[in-house]
Amino acid sequence: MGSASKRKSNRNMMDSQVSHNQKLGSSVCSKRGNDGQERTLSKGKKYVLVSFRDLPDHMKDNEFILGYYRANWPLKEALFSIFRWHNETLNVWTHFVGFLLFLGLAIANLMQVPQASDIFGLFSRSILTNTEMNSSNHSKSLLWISSKLPDLKHITPQKMDLSLPGMPTTRWPFYVFLGGSMFCLLSSSICHLFSCHSHKLNILFLRIDYTGITIMIITSFFPPIYYIFQCDSHWQFIYIGGITAMGVFTIVTLLSPSLSSGKYRAFRALLFCSMGFFGLVPAIHAVIVNWSNPKRDTILAYESAMALFYLTGTGFYISRIPERLKPGWFDLAGHSHQIFHVFVVLGALAHYGATLVFLDYRDRVGCEVNP
């Protein structure tokens, strides 16, 4: 009888101790739910990922991405989550790497490092030279001309057989474009990294993100319009002023908190596309004005690639493919927004290549040659 009472007392003490240990450990322990998401048992030091249904309403943007969300994370945790795997990781890194790439290109151009800054220009010049070669000496001539490409910048106007060539043109439109691209890519990365903090910051960073996209579109117009219509300044004013006015209207419109919600995704895309389609007018005009430009085909190839990249990326952004087809399969990698980011960077790089061709041409050909 005494032995049974003692065993019962020991068992109660053990149960009490286990319960006490669970309470102490609950603040740092986690488990996995039926959807595979890691969850805390109670208040914990480690911030974990949640599913779509557990998100606050202001973060429910894409119902086809089912898990791996961050919600209500402190700024410090959000910052260091750049090194964690969640459904925004690739959104952050795709544009942050793009920002670093354009920062490097800007520095290379400022420091006049041709190997880094003029890679697209060298490629375009090799294509242009290749089309002008005699077909009978195709192979040997291409190798010889390619080896001489870096010296093209040092050829005098007399050797180029140009009369009254222009002086080296101003670079500010080029750097405006680079600055706009860097601002867009960096603001996008910051938005995707920190918008999980709170509702207030979510709205703020979304506005900054949309502003960055608009600024990138506006500044992309500066180099082609400035350099193509360099000899006709009133067209510069009309086209640059027009796209800037459209951009300001777009920014003011998107400052409305309600238009930052997922409900108006298609409307936002329409605003951005309308700015892009505005470019068809100066583009057609530019082709007519520069029809005799020997680099016309190269420029058109670059700009067509840019338009294709941007439109394709926008198509993924609006349609939410592929996650729409297999919800939950592309939560971490391969969903539409990540694909959209990649196409944005590719489009900006294509435009950078076209801008180098503009600069190279205008450095050697003045308005008297190409009125």
Image (cartoon, helix red, strand yellow):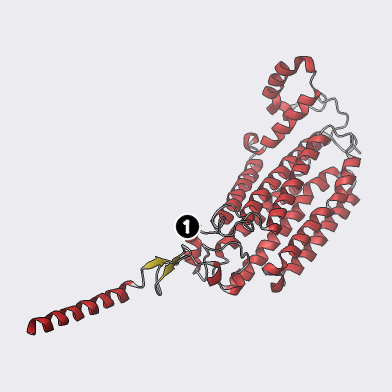
| Amino acid under disc 1 | Arg
Q: Mark 1 points at which residue?
A: 84
- Horizontally, residue 88 falls left or right of residue 150, namely left
Q: Can residue 44 be seen in this view?
A: yes
- Horizontally, residue 73 falls left or right of residue 174, namely left
SS for dot 1: loop
Work out whether 96 lies above or below 49: above
Which of the 4 image quarters holds residue 20? bottom left
Q: Where does the image place residue 87, in percent across and percent down from the top left?
A: 54, 59
Q: Which residue is drawn at 59% across and 59% down?
A: 327
Q: Is residue 168 visible?
A: no
Q: How crowded is mark 1: few (under 14 residues within 10 Å), some or many (20 or more)?
A: few
Residue ranking furthest to the top = 136
Residue ranking furthest to the left = 2
Which of the 4 image quarters holds residue 164? top right
Q: Which residue is drawn at 77% across and 64% down?
A: 250
Q: Where does the image place residue 95, in percent across and percent down from the top left?
A: 61, 52
Work out whether 245 lies above or below 255: above
Q: Where does the image place residue 118, in percent across and percent down from the top left?
A: 68, 36
